Amino acid sequence: MPPVLLTVTPESGAVNVTDESAIFTFDVIVDDRAGRAGNLASSFLVSPNEGGTVVSWHRDRVEVRPRRGFREGVAYSVTMLPGVADLNRNVLRETRVISFSIGPTIPPYAIHGRVFDWMAERIAGDARIDVIRMPDSLPYVGVTDSAGQFAIGPLDEGTYTVRALLDNNRNGLRDPNEMWDTTRIVVKGETPFVELRAALRDTLGPRLLTVAPIDSVTFLASFDHVLDAATPLTRSAFRVQRADSTELLIARVYTQSEFQRVRAAREAAPRDSVAGRREPPTTGAPKPSLPAPARDAVIELDATTPLLPLASYRVTAIEVRSLTGVARTSERAITIPKRDTTRAPGRRP
């Protein structure tokens, strides 16, 4: 059996607290080398958190406090996350949160929200949440549950910067290969709900990596970074030229997912024109309010200017923006192979 949490002091909801630490008492000795990141300290959070958290192990008792001590007049929350274990490594899966104030009142507000792994379009459990109060930069911290949801508080009215981080190594820092998102929210009169969509956000603009033909009038352009979801791909963002600099006419530009849907609809249209069937409703886990940002673009040419076998072309992406809004112009050359590329998409020879 995992450890049983017997008592927590101070009690949740207490005001005018004078304790120097929050104390968690268990029915057995807990393992000081077990926890979410291989140590007991990783299973406890103090919010707001200035200078880090000090976790002291006393066999069946764990004391938790901010490194700089509790600040007069500030309300705190202390969270015990799943991961506490006994000496036989029986792990406690319970989450326990207490809120108390070093002053006479506890603020009534919080920030609630949900975090998504945007690229996978799925909820992100165990994501780190940082909430910074402006203008004094008082840092609050939390994590998402298995449903990707979080609640950070208690908070006063004010302006806050909220960041979600998929902290793979759990060091509390945003490393270059980790996905994140941030927003600014005003808390006034009610508890707001925010949606955060974590993705890799590079400080450089996206660059064309490859250009590959699909058929005689369409080709796939792939970038090294995801593209700005708020900026639609248009014909003006691309230029296709022959070796003699003659420009080809671009009819449409799709994301790859859009092109696949359009192509499937075209192929299914003759079979479904009479039946008029409807797609069944989908149910399941929540999805982000915006589809995942694209890394590829499908450029469809006008039928009067197709791609010719063995001909060379230059494709230019003009001021294409990344998720962070950085624009970049890049180009790639392509030579159309000798094989027959004039078949309709998806049709077998």
Image (tube, rainbow, N blue to C red):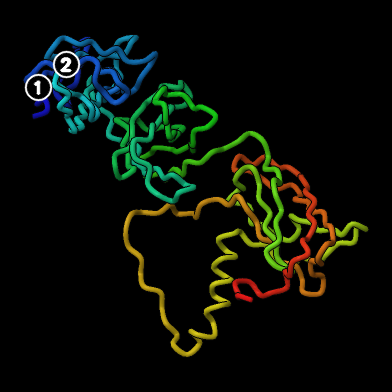
**287 w.r.t. 155: above or below:** below
73 lies above or below 120:
above
Instruction: Identify the element where label 2 is drawn.
Output: strand
Disc with the residue nearer the chain's start (2 vs 1): 1
Foreground pick, 109 / 292: 292
| Residue 150 location (% of width, % of height) | 32, 38
Residue reaching furthest bottom? 274
- Look at mark 2 in the image and give the residue it sits on: 23
Residue 162 in view, yes or no: no
Q: Which amino acid does the dot numbered 1 rest on?
A: Thr
Q: Residue furthest right?
A: 244
Foreground: 139 or 225? 225
Q: Amino acid at mark 2?
A: Ile
Task: Determine the residue positioned at 31% across, 31% down.
Answer: 153
Q: Residue at horizontal 67%, vertical 43%?
A: 206
In the image, residue 317 above or below residue 93: below
Question: Which residue is located at x 11 percent, y 28 percent?
Answer: 2
In this rendered view, identify the residue nearer to me: 65 or 301. Answer: 301
Q: Are marks 2 and 1 in contact (CB under 8 Å)?
A: yes
Question: In the rendered picture of this protein, how many numbered marks are placed on residues?
Answer: 2
Is residue 331 in view?
yes
Q: Which residue is mark 1?
A: 7
Quadrant placement of the N terminus:
top left
Residue 125: x and y, percent?
A: 34, 40
Q: Regarding mark 1 in the picture, which secondary structure is present there?
A: strand
Identify which residue is drawn at 16% across, 16% down. Answer: 23
Q: Left of 148 or right of it: where is 95?
A: left
- Give left or right: position of 109 versus 32: right
- Disc 2 versus disc 1: distance between alpha carbons? 8 Å
